[in-house]
Image (spheres, rainbow, N blue to C red):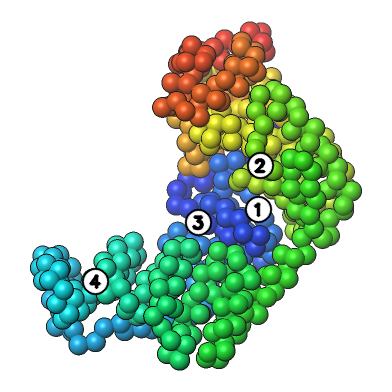
Amino acid sequence: MLVLLFALASACFADTIVLKNGRRIVASNVTEDATHVTYETPAGQMSIPRSFVLRIDRDNLSYTSASAANTSQPPVSTPQIEPLRGYEEVQHLAVHNDAIDFGYIAKLETDARTGDKSAIGRVAAAHYAAAEFLVAKGDTDDAIDHYRQALVFSPDNTGMLLNLAVLELRESHYTAALDPLEKARRVTPDTAPAAADIAKLEGWAYYGANKMDRAIEEWKRAEKLRPDPDVESALEKAQRDKDEEESYREGETAHFQLKYYGGAAPELAHAILHALEDDFRDLESQLDYTPPEQISVILYTEQAFGDITRAPGWAGALNDGRIRIPVQGLSDVTPELAHVLKHELTHSFVGQKSRGRAPTWLQEGLAQYMEGRRSAADAAALVDAAAQGGVPSLGSLEGSWMSLPENSAALAYAWSLAVVESVVQSGGMNDISRLLDRVASAPSTEDACRAILRSDYSDLQQQAVSYLKREYVR
Ligand SMILES: [Zn+2]
């Protein structure tokens, strides 16, 4: 329903919204106001209450806290470390005239392979200089490479290990950051000044990875080694996040794990689980597939979600591996909510059955079909568009729809539904089920269509137009 109202972004860069419950939403055009964080997804514009958001990791490396007005602030400040002294000359030779001298570094590497201690120091210093040069240029990936190479020669250099960890942390590579931090810890006695820095950065890594217990543990340790107001306030915030997470309530059935904020009515949660179990059985038999793991469902009930839930079509619901549904103001499963549940659950089935390889047209076409939508209202417009060569090819609808201009997105949803509808009409749901299995292993979806439906994309498109004419257009 909302399909025709979607406004999709044309910008392609992606930000990561990190939610307090640990999930990440990669989206474009992330904006925030006093109460909401709004972003674009292939399914249209979404909005979630700010209070659910831990932070937003911007694509351009700047770092935004969603819960505070101050931007570009990591949870703790980064220590300044000068890992090598006495190699200034080498550093000038490694980077000069605004460029890295790779020939010089290669020569130093050859020297260092002899095992000579000062040669090893020189090559580490050269890579360090190159890394710092790249950091200043904003090229973090390549800087990380140089730190790793420096550490090949000088594996116990705490300063370089910490500098590498900081770069990884700024890139939100929290697990990757733990590796140099653990190495640094092994070679650093608790009495050394760097010990507190290591604990501080480990706290950041665990906090980023949403392991609040470990983050709290590390920041407490840092505080003990060297009291720091910066760590103290990070520690308080982590404690608050942890308390809030604990206020989630849970429900569980054979196939679902449901989480919801304490304020939601348990009866609604119960009714939703009941509806989902019915949908599960239906999809299981229609698609001849049983997802192996319990499916996570999260209900959002914040007051601030109200405007989204009143929107037609429930654009606020979302499936990013977990099914997320705003239910503010509802006390029972309305027909509208029932559609949303079926739609989102279909995405879970299709995603898993096709091992994540189903193209967007098949995902959205089938999800709309399963929720009960049909092409009647859009048929005439689609037939007209097709006559003028104005419908998108299925090949162009395989990937993300994020960068489609807004009118094309509405058309993409309607067209995908029409194609799926015509496939079901001609070969039954059995064809769809076999198609999904084949998509999981075929080199391409079009190959799978040829094998299972004996049609390529152009055949399918023609079949859809004929079907629309026959079924809906007089
Ligand atoms: Zn969808």
What's the distance in space between the residues labelled 4 and 1, CA to CA? Answer: 48 Å
- Along the polypeptide, which appears first: circle 2 or circle 3? 3
Question: Which of label 4 and label 1 is nearer to you?
Answer: 4
Q: Which numbered mark, 1 or 2, is in the foreground of this view?
A: 2
Q: Are marks 4 and 2 in contact (CB under 8 Å)?
A: no
Quick one: label 4, few (<14), some, or many (20+) residues within 10 Å?
many
Q: Amino acid at mark 1?
A: Ser
Asked if marks 4 and 1 touch (Cβ < 8 Å), the reply is no
Residue indicated by mark 3: 15
Element carrying mark 3: strand
Mark positioned earlier in the residue sequence (3 or 4): 3
Q: Residue at x 48, y 63 (%)?
A: 175
Image location (x, y in percent) of residue 262: 82, 60
User: In which quadrant will I find the C terminus?
Assistant: top right
Q: Earlier in the sequence, mark 1 or mark 3?
A: 3
Mark 2 secondary-structure assignment: loop
Q: At x 47% / y 42%, what residue is drawn? A: 403
Residue at 69% x, 70% y is: 242
Q: Could you give the CA–CA distance between mark 4 and mark 2, rounded to whole angstroms? A: 45 Å
Query: Pointer 1: what residue?
Result: 47
Q: Earlier in the sequence, mark 1 or mark 2?
A: 1
Mark 4: which secondary structure? Answer: helix
Query: Earlier along the polypeptide chain: callout 4 or callout 2?
Result: 4
